Image (spheres, rainbow, N blue to C red):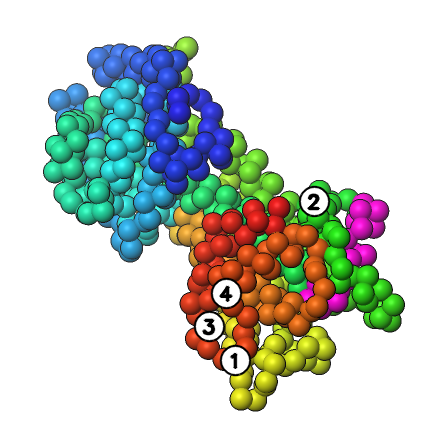
Amino acid sequence: MILDRSLSLEDFIRVARGGEKVELSDAARERILKARAVIERIVEGGAAVYGINTGFGKFASVRVGNDELQQLQYNLIVSHAIGVGDSLPAEVVRGMLLLRAVSLCQGHSGVRPEVVELLLALLNAGAHPVVPAQGSVGASGDLAPLAHLALALIGLGEIEYGGEVRPAADVLAELNLTPLTLQAKEGLALINGTQLMGSLLGLALADARTLLGTANLAAAMTVEALYGSHQPFRADLVGLRPHPGAVAVAEQLRYFLQDSEIAPSHAECGKVQDPYSLRAVPQVHGATHDALAQAARILDTEFASVTDNPLVFPETGEVVSGGNFHGQPLAVTADALKVAVAELGSMGERRCEQLLNPALSGLPGFLAAHGGLNSGMMIAQYTAAALVSENKVLAHPASVDSIPTSANQEDHVSMGAHGARQLRQILGHVQTVVSIELLCAAQALDFQQLRAGVGVQAAYERIREIVPSMEEDRYYRPDLLRLRELVVSGELLEVAG
């Protein structure tokens, strides 16, 4: 991939997860050089300009001599690399490397091309700086995590390479890469930015899209297993309240349910209405669809943005301080997605109850053909309920909190990294809840003698290839984990069409 101004979510995923190689475009290199020339003129001229020859944050008024500018940038990186917690997964770090390079190559940051080239060299080599997950308040960017990313560029810290975590200097030497000696403004340009938040959100959005489709599939399977009505999914009905998400979800449900032999078999059953967790799937899942669409719009903008400070305008020679590093757009987006994704889990758990409760389903209790001796899927719903309950805590908005930092210079912070990490946890929980619903719905379909709708039937048959029907109690966790792999990878959704 040639890196220039823009980056789609699909491009991002191919690099962060797929390992696609990236190189700098000639146009980007030219922009970088023009911005760098502005910085060098300021250094030669001697005027005090924030971020170039001054201290940082509360020390913005402290002038630093030209002979100390390299030391200034070095000190900035090592002092800010004080993150804690578990190391971020490789895919998140890869996303950070890519997004940091995209921002710098816009030509408003004032770094040398060598800085961007080293970021891309690490990315292309699969050499991932070790970045602790905690330490960002999401205001002046993701300072601590990005400082750990930058630490590797100067030969400090650690890099995960070839399955091993080793000193960064050793890995750089093995790759024939020379550590950077940071020049004026380069350290600040590397750590002012929203790339941890952006990477977490980009990966989460891709996963959430797959999860939404699979949750729709699980709902359709439950509708079939419970002799639910297809009428609430009619295009003309949903079209009377045509939120785009509701329309899209209803259309997908109709596809999964088309050519069902089950639906005609209970056309005259006398049941008037289904519970909301079946009947209102287009409206509830549709709201999640619309939240994902809004998040995609935010990320489209973010992935083509310059998020450090101060910013360089080569056309006028100005260097201007602003607030592009503030994480609030991503923080609010992460919080919205936390709620939207958590609701998929809430609906899925309620459908599990509909499947397992004999008073509601008309099926054997807990889907055990010989209940009493066997507990069936009883505790599967407990696990789903536990995860849904935990999500309620995680879904509390992180962005409503703010603790001032840097002696009150940074007096409002976004906490966006917290929200984005919580979103990742919620996604994992809901992937499991949807897998539990599919496990239960497939077991319920075993009591049917008719074929379900085409998408549901295809998914049911794929599930039965890896998870046998339950005749009597067994150790269910391996079944659930195998099914969860199909959910997370998107394979089950692909099978269903």
Q: Nearer the viewer, residue 439 or 346?
A: 439
Going by the image, does 158 lie left or right of 194?
Answer: left
Q: Give the x, y percent position of residue 356.
A: 62, 75
Numbered label attached to residue 472: 1
Counting other residues with Cα less than 10 Å from the Cα at mark 2, is it few (<14), some (14-19), or many (20 or more)?
some
Where does residue 389 sit, x and y in percent of width and height?
52, 69
| Residue of label 2 | 248
Q: Which residue is at 87% across, 68% downward?
A: 268
Which is closer to the viewer, label 3 or label 4?
4
Residue 115 coordinates in the image, percent (x, y): 26, 25
Outermost residue toward the bottom in this view: 372
Of the residues under marks 4 and 2, which one precedes in the sequence?
Answer: 2
| Above/below status of 10 relative to 237 | above
Q: Position of residue 153 (x, y in %)?
A: 21, 33
Q: Nearer the viewer, mark 1 or mark 2?
A: 1
Q: Secondary structure at mark 3?
A: loop
Which residues make up the magenta segment? 223-239
**SS under mark 2:** helix
Identify residue type, mark 3.
Answer: Tyr
Label 3 with label 2: CB-CB less than 8 Å: no
Q: Identify residue for label 4.
A: 467
User: Which disc is residue 476 wearing?
Assistant: 3
Disc 4 is placed on an element classified as loop
Mark 4, Cα crowd under 10 Å, few <14 / some 14-19 / many 20+, is: some
- Image height of 304 relative to 295, above or below: above
